[in-house]
Image (tube, rainbow, N blue to C red):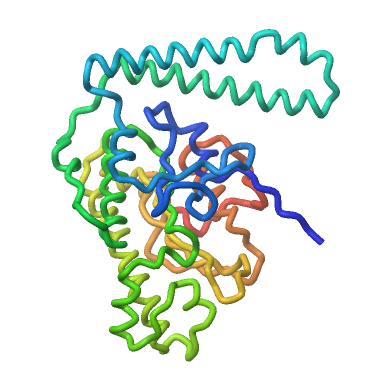
Amino acid sequence: MYSVRPSVSVDQVAVKHLGPTWVPSLALSFADGVGTATLSRNSMGVDVPATANYRTVFERLFPPADKDQLKEAKARLALNHSILDTAGAGVKDFQRQLGADDRKRLDQYLDSIREVEKRLDDSEMILDRGRPKFDEESVKTVPQGKNGMREHIEMMMDLIALAFQTDMTRVVTHSLGGEGGPNYDEYKDWAQAAGAPVRGAHDVHHKAQGGADSPEAKVIASRDEMLVACLARLMDKLKAIRAADGNLLDHTVLLFGGAQISSHSGKSFPTLLAGGRKLGFKHGQHVKYEGDKVPMSNLYLTILQQLGCPVKAFKESSAPLSEVLA
């Protein structure tokens, strides 16, 4: 018997050390919400809701430019400060009356308050600095009607590149809506081209017959080819943005992958690590680990440490991965 307890995700650990920014982190997806729609969990193991709407993400990313809206934003920050002051008042006296377990829970609550207070202070500083200058019209145009799977991903990738370029956030996750991915119309086209039954990616993983050369394997290959092309597009955009030392891709770590196999077992994750040349990462290689000897958390730990986060362990990690470092 064993139990699985939800715990903080790696991106939210990075948030504590990479800032300050206007938006601490972005959780993006194909569908608004929690569960398989998000990859992010806070320090209590609670889902951080993901956003699928391009316009909502854009509006959230930047401080208001209008003077009246700016005034309203500052007033909201002041009100939130006041609420936090009220929430923390008298807690120390109450804390003395609690047992050890209850004091620990209260300490977590107080840590959360202090974290929010810091973010409010950071937000005030960024509001005073003002909205960054960029070509807004080039990213405001959203195609009308239903967007296809690739189009949706590319729009979100454009926002990610813009968010990093303007330093409005430094941490982003993007969920494909579960390991199988959303069942967009593209699957029908891929299935027809391959001569395969028309069904969603999840069913293909479970029910496909004939191995790597089967028609349904070709459907998944078409999907993966599209996803890798979208990632390459993001990398090209980041590489084209100059940074103080090199380009933005040199200072950005991109992690892409999934764990969907026929048995649902949490092992043998196909993962692509890109970027971060100036952060000490080495590329151009395929590293394969034997069986269950190396937990995925070792890679997460490596990324956190190379980003400068002062962490010595992450979940079940045993050591950083020297093989991916220059």
Is 315 left or right of 223, judged from the image as shown? right
Occupied quadrant, residue 229? bottom left
Identity of the residue drawn at 66% across and 25% down: 109
| Image coords of residue 326 (percent x, y) | 43, 53
| Image coords of residue 183 (percent x, y) | 40, 67
Is 70 left or right of 176, judged from the image as shown? left
In the rendered image, which quarter contains the N terminus?
A: bottom right
- Residue placed most toward the observer, 81 or 274: 81
| Image coords of residue 251 (percent x, y) | 35, 43
Identity of the residue drawn at 60% across and 26% down: 112
Is 159 situated above or below 295? above
Is 18 situated above or below 193? above
Is 139 left or right of 224, judged from the image as shown? left
Identity of the residue drawn at 55% across and 24% down: 115
Identity of the residue drawn at 48% across and 52% down: 37
- Residue placed most toward the observer, 295 or 9: 9
| Image coords of residue 54 (percent x, y) | 30, 45
Count of marks, rendered view: 0
The residue most toward the front is: 145
Occupied quadrant, residue 222? bottom left
Occupied quadrant, residue 27? top left
- Residue placed most toward the observer, 271 or 226: 226
Is 214 left or right of 268, judged from the image as shown? left
Is 291 situated above or below 218? above
Q: Is residue 305 visible?
A: no
The residue most toward the bottom is: 210
Q: Is residue 223 visible?
A: yes
